[in-house]
Amino acid sequence: MDGEKTSLRGVSCLVLGGGGFIGTHLCQALLRQGAQVSGFGRSRTDPRALAGVVWTSGEFADRTALARAVEGCEVVFHLLGGSIPDSSNRDPLGDLLSSAVPSLQLLEICRASMVRKVLFVSSGGTVYGIPRAIPIPESAPTDPISAYGISKLAVEKYLALYHYLYACDYSVLRVANTFGPYQSPHRRQGLIAAFMHRIARGQPVEIWGDGRVVRDFIYIDDVVDAILAASIYDGPHHVFNVGAGVGRSVLEVVTDIADVLGRPDVIPIHKPGRATDVPVNVLDIALIRRELGWSPHTDWRDGLQRTADWIRTVQD
Amino acid sequence: MDGEKTSLRGVSCLVLGGGGFIGTHLCQALLRQGAQVSGFGRSRTDPRALAGVVWTSGEFADRTALARAVEGCEVVFHLLGGSIPDSSNRDPLGDLLSSAVPSLQLLEICRASMVRKVLFVSSGGTVYGIPRAIPIPESAPTDPISAYGISKLAVEKYLALYHYLYACDYSVLRVANTFGPYQSPHRRQGLIAAFMHRIARGQPVEIWGDGRVVRDFIYIDDVVDAILAASIYDGPHHVFNVGAGVGRSVLEVVTDIADVLGRPDVIPIHKPGRATDVPVNVLDIALIRRELGWSPHTDWRDGLQRTADWIRTVQD
């Protein structure tokens, strides 16, 4: 009807972390596809945005609650993570226990519940570590410099193991730095949301290091399209980079945000660089283009504009 | 004095898992080098073999006991593992909790105690999974088909992280199938010990699959030499394969054991293959040869003979 693929019509889908930034968009997209959507997580960024989603509030580590949520689901989207890259290095064990451990419990539950496919949102920005070549293909070495990245990688390996042992189907999406509406400007993850929120209010922005750190920024709608495409993919590949395939420095991003917001008066405050920040990260997206027929559609400035329109509505 | 390197003379060394097969040999070798040796682990294969070693019985998961054992040590040899490949797949979570989790606790302790170097005995037979090319170099993809291999790999990644964040030095030894005296014939790990014990007594041997599974078998003395060489290595590499670099099928091994024991009357019982068994595993040992000047010295038949001499002394 609306040009979207219809293979998820009527399919029972569970989105773990469905109340977060990517999760909220994914739930909405699944509803548009005609899927039966349930969500599970600690909290919802905007409960009104999840109208039509059967919601369960619960902790990822709560095995019983998780099993109840998974029961009867055909496709599980796993968007839950324990911590964020920087804080994970202050407590690697806490990250492992809150990320890899419950993820493994999840796999056991999915296997017992005969879930058809698990889609795991991994981290294109951290699993590779410091890249030896740019852009980074999926086959590049994976040497994370954060405990966060190690946990994500471990979950990827367990998914592959369950596929090997029990033929549980899965896809791993190694997603780049995602931005767009519903990304909270008040968390430590999500540079564009945080910067935009402050620049829009004429507040100074903190830049870690010299601002020449390069990242691959991708708009949320493109990320959701990639996850949906992977969910109905049936080919031999399991791990896909999801990014714009373009690198932008933090300083460029600040300049472009200021421009979109019409606030050229940005006050940058330079802070010492963080050990968890790789100097550059740009993903090679040739594989996903070829296998899933996916490519990023949203123009960089359009994405920033749409994010800016939303961020103006956010309360301080 | 005896031609061995003397750089470990007077150095305070802790061997975690010092009571096991490799651990017992390592403790003895460290004592011969003039190191001050302490050992920590659940139990000792042969307490008499550890004369001169300050021994602490403890659980790996007991953080307090572990911290006490590490205190004041300069070099820590980490030989502890949670489970074995086959059983790990029956309880991946148990493996993660008993292997990667306490290993991460260990790294925190080593960092706080200013340990100079950590030597980790990883698994050359499982971290790579099903190889795409033989022999397998250290740079090959790491796609384990056992939870055991995933845990070992995670520990390797955490060691690299602690090196990156805190300059904690380390070496990873990806050791092939080790055999020799003190390897219990009554455990599920250690094919040669188990086969030898049964063949020596005229008992049938169970062969998983068709017996064409190929492994890289290396004699214990060579493994210990590699660990010692790595402990005093100061170069840029951190991950080394330790193997004979030669592949032998299980059937060949059975024939050679029968020959060494003078028991041509072996009764093989073929059992179904196990999902955790990769079809072939032979390690590329070019890197360790070049960087550590190490190479395997023990002739295959000599190693079998020495193992046979010991196995005859083992009680049923």
Image (tube, coloured by chain):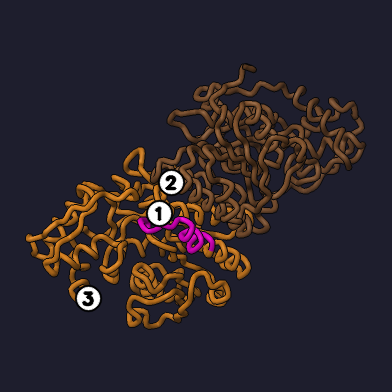
Chain colours: A orange, B brown
Same chain, labels 2 and 3: no
Q: CA distance from mark 2 to mark 1?
A: 9 Å
Whether the magenta-drawn stretch holds residue B181 is answered as no
SS under mark 2:
helix
User: What secondary structure characterizes most of the magenta part?
Assistant: helix
Question: Looking at the image, which residue is at 69% across and 35% down?
Answer: B52
Q: CA distance from mark 1 to mark 3?
A: 30 Å
Using the image, tell me which numbered label, if any, was put on residue B52.
none
Q: Which residue is mark 2?
A: B161
Side of B142 where B262 appears, left or right:
right
Question: Looking at the image, which residue is at 25% across and 68% down?
Answer: A185
SS under mark 3:
loop
Q: CA distance from mark 2 to mark 3?
A: 37 Å
Using the image, tell me which numbered label, if any, was put on residue A89.
1
SS under mark 1:
loop
Mark 2–mark 1 CB contact (< 8 Å): yes
Q: Which residues are drawn in magenta?
A: A85-101
Which chain contains the residue that carries disc 2?
B
The three-letter amino acid code for the residue at tag 2 is Leu
Q: Which residue is mark 3?
A: A314
Question: Looking at the image, which residue is at 44% across and 41% down?
Answer: B168
Q: Is residue A9 above or below residue B221?
A: below
Mark 1–mark 3 CB contact (< 8 Å): no
Q: Position of residue B6 (x, y in %)?
A: 56, 23
The three-letter amino acid code for the residue at tag 1 is Asn
Same chain, labels 2 and 1: no
